[in-house]
Image (cartoon, rainbow, N blue to C red):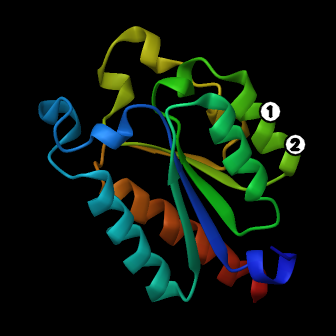
Amino acid sequence: MTDSIQSGTIHVVNGPNLNLLGTREPAIYGRTTLADIEAMCRAACERHGISLVFGQSNHEGEMVEMIHRASGSLGVVLNAAAYTHTSVALADAIKAVGVTAIEVHLSNVFAREAFRHHSYISSVARGVICGFGAQGYRFAIDALAESRATTAA
């Protein structure tokens, strides 16, 4: 895609096991499915007149490629899931392409196990949203859309 096409696009990248949302540990992650989240993200992007590229992978390298494809876009909403706590490669991909990223987590990772308190993504993200369930994606999309409006003004 060219920069002019990409500039009005938000990429949502989801990591491992998020394809199981709705049935995976519903006490922690809720009953909302990944398809429900995609529909919510599409609606949020449509309200802002922004295109959406939505993806999920259980493979770190595939997620790196998704971030590379977001180069020149309005930004990336990244729920790296368990890779948040282990992946230097995802952080490096964000830095390498220079894309604005917002880190999202369905649960409040700081109210969970200690190993979840560290993120390799946070240091390269514009912000972090956690603990608001699926609504966190909408908050991130709104933030990226508002930053575009502020930049254009």
Residue lying at 63% horizontally and 40% vertically, measured from the top left: 63
Q: Are marks 1 and 2 in contact (CB under 8 Å)?
A: yes
Q: What amino acid is labelled 1 in the image?
A: Asp
**Would you identify the image quadrant in which residue 93 lies?**
top right
Q: Position of residue 88 (x, y in %)?
A: 72, 23
Instruction: Find residue 47 and report its horizontal and vertical position in percent.
Output: 44, 87
User: Is 14 situated above or below 88?
Assistant: below
Image coordinates of residue 67 in percent, x first then y, are: 71, 49
Q: Quadrant of the C terminus?
A: bottom right
At label 2, which amino acid type do we have? Ala
Residue 77 x %, y %:
56, 54
Q: Which residue is the site of mark 2?
A: 96
Name the residue at 30% across, 49% down. Answer: 132
Q: Residue furthest top?
A: 114
- In three-dimensional space, the C-alpha distance between marks 1 and 2, rounded to whole angstroms, equals 6 Å
Q: Which quadrant holds residue 36?
A: bottom left
Is the residue 131 above or below the residue 135 in the image?
above
Around disc 2, counting alpha carbons within 10 Å, would you say few (fewer than 14), some (14 to 19), or many (20 or more)?
Answer: few
Residue assigned mark 1: 92
Q: Count neighbours of disc 1 (C-alpha within 10 A) and say few if under 14, some if 14 to 19, many if 20 or more.
A: some
Quarter residue 61 falls in: top right
Residue at x 63%, y 56% (from the top left corner): 76
Mark seen at residue 128: none
Q: Say which of 50 and 66 sits in front.
A: 66
User: Does residue 33 appear left or right of residue 104 in this picture?
Assistant: left
Q: Secondary structure at mark 2?
A: helix
Q: Quadrant of the N terminus?
A: bottom right
Q: Is residue 54 above or below residue 123?
A: below
